[in-house]
Amino acid sequence: MFNLDEFISKYVTKRQESMFWTDIVRNQKNLSKKIQDKTILIIGGAGSIGSSFIQAILPFRPKALVVVDINENALAELTRNLRNTRGIYIPDDYITYPMDYATPVFKKMFINRGGFDVVANFSAHKHVRTEKDIYSVEALIQNNVLHTKELLELLTQYPPEEYFCVSTDKAANPVNIMGASKRVMEDVIFSYSDKFPVKTARFANVAFSNGSLLAGFLDRIARCQPISAPLDVRRYFVSPKESGQICLLACMIGGNREIFIPKLKETQMMTFDSIAVSLLKTYGYDVFLCGSDEEALNKAEDLVNGSKVYPVHFSVSDTSGEKAYEEFYTDSELVDMTRFDSLGVIVGKEIPDRKKIDLLFNNLLSAFEKNSTTKKEIVKILSGYLPDFEHIEKEKSLDRKM
């Protein structure tokens, strides 16, 4: 019987236990002090990383746990999973709300509860494929950047003990709008660091996370559909469990304006095609390399009849915003690699210039108010704020590929 966690350990992360476990054990007392009997709000908590974060904090027995997410079905499954996990602690004050955090009803709930001790925000557009056109770009920036500021303004009324918002490795030397938006998000949250402690984390792809290409492999196999993947894209990976743990450490014991990163070596990068081959072999298939999407689709018809030869189409990446490799920090950032066994910490960040951020927001809002604004104009605005933003534009999105 296929076991996803075992597959990830053996073929993707190639680690039998979490790379962060030693640091969690060493900081057990501090983590307990930060979490036990505290009220915690988790935004975007039904997603892969948010739900893993929840499972990482529950052993430390928080007083209250409120989870907000726009995905009502995922919230229901989150609760079912927690309630059906033997031995897990769930506080009496546990409630989920299917709502957008940038709405009046969220604000009403937040104020009536008098704020929270810990606020962790996992709500994000996280896929490079999101930047299709000006409409998808506006939605991405609204969620990742503009709405974040609205939340932070609300938090100033009820300052939390800790505020955490997840970033991405794609924020380091960004080449796509998603990565650039997260890099801007870092500055936005740090601009409030004189009002309450703010922290974030950049880390690798979460293996088989919701909506990811790897999770798509499982869906393709279940539907007897061909698998397509890039040949030339290398990525770092962490397990779902590890994704929650790095956020736990960053949120609870990270210092103000610090960015946590995993200590991963370049040799630990994986390609998507190699993972696809390992997955298919684990399922008992022989791999058949096709020269096109059409050939793979035609060949997949045999799978319905029980064929154990699986068609795949691996090709060179040719879509906008795809970086050939990932990095966690830039040459201009100061990184402390001595504090933890498994983590580096980007330190020495100054409070960003609020006037510069306000100007960026005004430029973005003005652009979005016009019906004639293009994606290219938004890239120009972001580039004016982020000198290291070099957008890779190939006039083709992932939605045009299999």
Image (cartoon, helix red, strand yellow):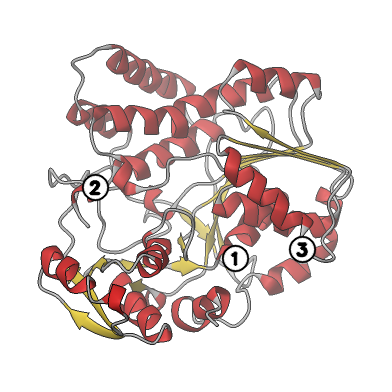
Q: Which residue is labeled 1 in the image?
A: 242
Q: Which residue is labeled 3 in the image?
A: 85
**Where in the figure is residue 250, as x and y percent of width and height?**
64, 53
Q: Is residue 5 visible?
A: yes
Going by the numbered disc 1, the residue's amino acid type is: Glu
**Where in the figure is residue 123, as x and y percent of width and height?**
53, 39
Crowding around mark 3 (Cα neighbors within 10 Å: few <14, some 14 to 19, many 20+) is few
Instruction: Say whether marks 1 and 2 touch (CB < 8 Å).
Output: no
As measured in the structure, the alpha-carbon distance from the residue carrying label 1 to the one carrying label 2 is 29 Å
In this view of the protein, which residue sits in the foreground, 311 or 188? Answer: 311
Which of labels 1 and 3 is toward the front?
A: 3
Above or below, 111 against 239 in this view is above
Disc with the residue nearer the chain's start (1 vs 2): 1
Going by the numbered disc 3, the residue's amino acid type is: Thr
Instruction: Say whether marks 2 and 3 touch (CB < 8 Å).
Output: no
In this view of the protein, which residue sits in the foreground, 212 or 281? Answer: 281
As measured in the structure, the alpha-carbon distance from the residue carrying label 1 to the one carrying label 3 is 18 Å
Specify the quadrant that holds the C terminus.
Answer: bottom left
Q: Is residue 255 visible?
A: no
**Where in the figure is residue 359, as x and y percent of width and height?**
38, 18
Disc with the residue nearer the chain's start (1 vs 3): 3
Specify the quadrant that holds the N terminus.
Answer: bottom right
Judging from the image, what secondary structure is the residue with disc 1 in? helix
Q: Which residue is labeled 2 in the image?
A: 399
Disc with the residue nearer the chain's start (2 vs 3): 3
